[in-house]
Amino acid sequence: MSDGRYKFRSQWLLPASAPRVYAVLADVETYPSWWPQVRKATRIDDVSGELTCRSLLPYDLVFRMHQELRDPERLVLRATMTGDLNGTSQWTISADGDGATRAIFDEDVAVGSGLVSAAGRLFRPALKFNHDLMMRSGEKGLRKHLSPGA
């Protein structure tokens, strides 16, 4: 992380098949049902939407996502983001033996203008902690969502 950019990588090990994990992660509109920090997901068109996210820090991050790649054969999802976050995010999903799946989330973003940008420069460690907490919570929520009987 330098020059106002943040590069994050998270790996989730999930108790479901890779195609099932891919299908859930491709359906961004349902994220608020299993990911507590994704407060709102609004579809704009077939390849775009707007997300509102909030973790511990006392402000919402609002950004638009535009799908760049949706590859169900290679199990890759990639989007560009604009707004409070500007950059790219990508999910790469793969089988990890015994019915488990590894989902890797890579994000390369810069914070947008205004309060979020100012907070980014002043509270860089807090923003990283906030992101890590959000990702741990997302993994926990998705594990529960994928569990039998959910």
Image: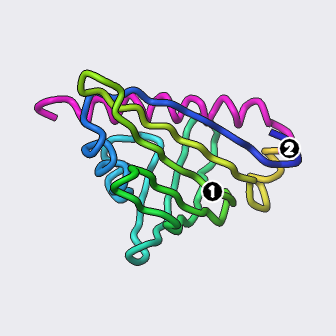
The mark found on residue 88 in the picture is: 1
Residue 38 in the image, given as x and y percentages of width and height: 45, 48
Residue bounds of the magenta highlight: 121-150
Q: Observer-nearest residue: 21 or 109?
A: 21
Name the residue that disc number 2 marks.
121
Q: Observer-nearest residue: 93 or 108?
A: 93
Mark 2 residue element: helix
The mark found on residue 122 in the picture is: none
Magenta: main secondary structure equals helix
Mark 1 residue element: strand
Q: Quadrant of the N terminus?
A: top right
**Vertical position of residue 132 compared to residue 65: above or below:** above
Q: Please tell me which residue is depicted at 77% across the width and 30% down the height of the picture.
A: 125
Q: Observer-nearest residue: 46 or 130?
A: 46
Please give left or right for residue 26 compared with residue 104 in the image. left
Q: Three-letter amino acid code at disc 1?
A: Thr
Q: Three-letter amino acid code at disc 2?
A: Arg
Q: Please tell me which residue is depicted at 48% across the width and 47% down the height of the picture.
A: 91
In terms of sequence position, does the residue under pointer 1 or pointer 2 come before the other?
Answer: 1
Question: 10 Å neighbourhood of mark 1: few (<14), some, or many (≥20)?
Answer: many
Label 2 near label 1: C-beta < 8 Å?
no
Q: Please tell me which residue is depicted at 27% across the width and 45% down the height of the picture.
A: 19
Q: In which quarter of the image is the C terminus?
A: top left
- Tell me where residue 98 sits by quadrant: top left
Q: Nearer the viewer, mark 1 or mark 2?
A: 1
Q: Please tell me which residue is depicted at 59% across the width and 63% down the height of the picture.
A: 80
Q: Residue at the far bottom: name it.
A: 45
Q: Residue at the far left: name it.
A: 149
**Vertical position of residue 106 compared to residue 109: above or below:** above
